[in-house]
Image (tube, rainbow, N blue to C red):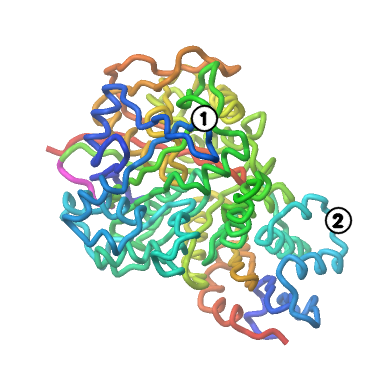
Amino acid sequence: MQQVYLKSDSIISPLGFGTMANLRELRLQNSALKLQKPTSKYPAGYYAGMLDEEIIDRSFSLIGNCEDYTKLEKMLILAIKDVVDKEERVDSLSTGLVIATTKGNIDLLNSNKFAKERVELWKMAQVVADFFGFKNKPIVVSNACISGGLAIKTAADFIKYGKFDSAIVAAGDLVSDFVLSGFQSFQAMSAKACKPFDAERNGISLGEAAAAVFIDGQTSQEQNVEFIHAVTTNDANHISGPSRDGEGLYQAISRLEHFTGITSEEIDAISAHGTATIYNDEMEAIAFNRSNLNDIPMHSLKGYFGHALGASALIESIMLKHSLLNNELIISKNFESSGVSASLNITTEATQKKLNIALKTASGFGGCNIAMLFRKTKAHV
Amino acid sequence: MSEDQSIKFIKIKDNRITSSEGLLFKTEDKLESIKFMSQAYKFFGINYSKFFKMDGLSKAGFIAAELLSEKIQLEKNTGLIFSNSSSSQDTDLRFQESMQNFASPSVFVYTLPNIVLGEISIRHSIQSENAFFITEKFDPELMLDYAEIQLKNLACENVLCGWLNLHNNEYDVFLWHVADLEDLQSQRGQLPKIYATTNE
């Protein structure tokens, strides 16, 4: 079976533009989550990671006309541009484009600034593809909060089976009034910056961001991270609540281990979903416990970026890739004492440790789960 | 019976529900999506209380899967590979409206296109691969390509594919079953024709 690799990547978030800028902020324990100004709807304000469009435009004006693109399109294009500039192998004919998002340009629903069609996810993706002149029709993945991971799986699967030579996977979502109202109606928003797996966690914080990664079927001289395999499952239990026994996530992890022959003992690090809702984190803890992954160093990055919905699993996979390359465990921000029933090895101190294989998981509305394995390959010198 | 009739499908469009075997149900008047699906639900004598809280997209997908499940076995290892053009826009607009007064959590949960995969999974105890793609038009090759890889990877044993679109109250539903790899290869090229056929 052909191998596929995660090559150049980029993250566009309130913490910075480019993966290195974001990684630097994570190492400094800085968070994108800030208390936003009170509004009539949110009299106490709310914590979220917000990216000012003026700041986006400062960068975007160097490569395009800011008026022609929506905020999210500009974020996606900036992330992809950063990747394209570093990758000679990106080819407008043979490189595929896979875009993950849950709500896309949902902020246009009440606006006349752009043609009505622009709120359609396929249209947004086409606008982004056209910016770069990609000839393949972009593939849009919209599968709730596993979208960013499922987009990596989709691209990797299509490369392994010869549909593309390589692919750019991009993902993005905004903190819109739409999703804010939605999560508030669920009473799922944390009053403080979210605290994944902590005893005092009390809900999510939203964050807007975009990211991109080049997925390639060809290895290169330098050290790479390989995408090994991914499995998705459905809880078949509830459309908005995680299953109490973590069965869906447990099944995803155990099937993934079965297919790859990789055992729990061989996994060196885990990037969990860790949204910081009471039920999600508990469900994950039970699933990891059932998978004998209690002792594996684990983090959630939601305390840095917030929950970027369809982009979160891509951002977190990119960070996990850099953890592997740098042999570095990233601190799970805002975790102080465990608030889940199973013991987990949550990273609370920046640690240098030899890392080879890492697991990324995510779960979302509709009962979906994804588990993905990445492995560091040796440099070919 | 022509060869392409071997594909097990359910099509719901223009007040009609058809299958590989012909017309199953129709209404004389053009009804809005939710009303049509409710009439179909009654007509087929389905008894599933969760149906009533579903949004339009899920109701349509649920009924199509329900009717298909009489002909084929939906099971734990059935992959669900769906797509549409308008995502969850029908419900997005409803939620946007509700935001002015009382933002409803039970509406918000349906503002994602893949929720219907959860509804179908719950009903038929399916715990396998899920994917929801957005394409401008019906693109069976994308779904078949992805389904082929999942079958080759043994990620699932068979696949329920679906085009499930709801836009401006126009519903366009086409679900079909892929029994195995051989079945999948025989379906290539046939699906656009079957999808486009005005059913007798």
In this rendering, the answer to whether A101 lies above or below A124 is: above
In this rendering, the answer to whether A21 lies above or below A159 is: above
Q: Chain of mark 2?
A: B
User: Going by the image, does B84 lie left or right of A172?
Assistant: right
Q: Chain of mark 1?
A: A
Q: Residue at position x 80%, y 68% from top? A: B40
Q: How many marks?
A: 2
Image coords of residue A163 (percent x, y): 36, 63
Image coords of residue B37 (percent x, y): 76, 66
User: Going by the image, does A292 lie left or right of A166?
Assistant: right
Mark 2 residue crowding within 10 angstroms, few (<14) / some (14–19) / many (20+) = few
Q: Main secondary structure of the magenta part?
A: loop
Image coords of residue A203 (percent x, y): 55, 29
Report the residue marked by disc 2: B47
> Farthest left residue?
A381
Amino acid at circle 1: Ala
Report the residue marked by disc 1: A44
Q: Residue at position x 32%, y 38% from top? A: A14
Indicate the quadrant containing the C terminus of chain A: top left, top right, bottom left or bottom right. top left
- The magenta stretch is A217-221
Q: Residue at position x 18%, y 57% from top? A: A63
Image coords of residue B42 (percent x, y): 86, 65
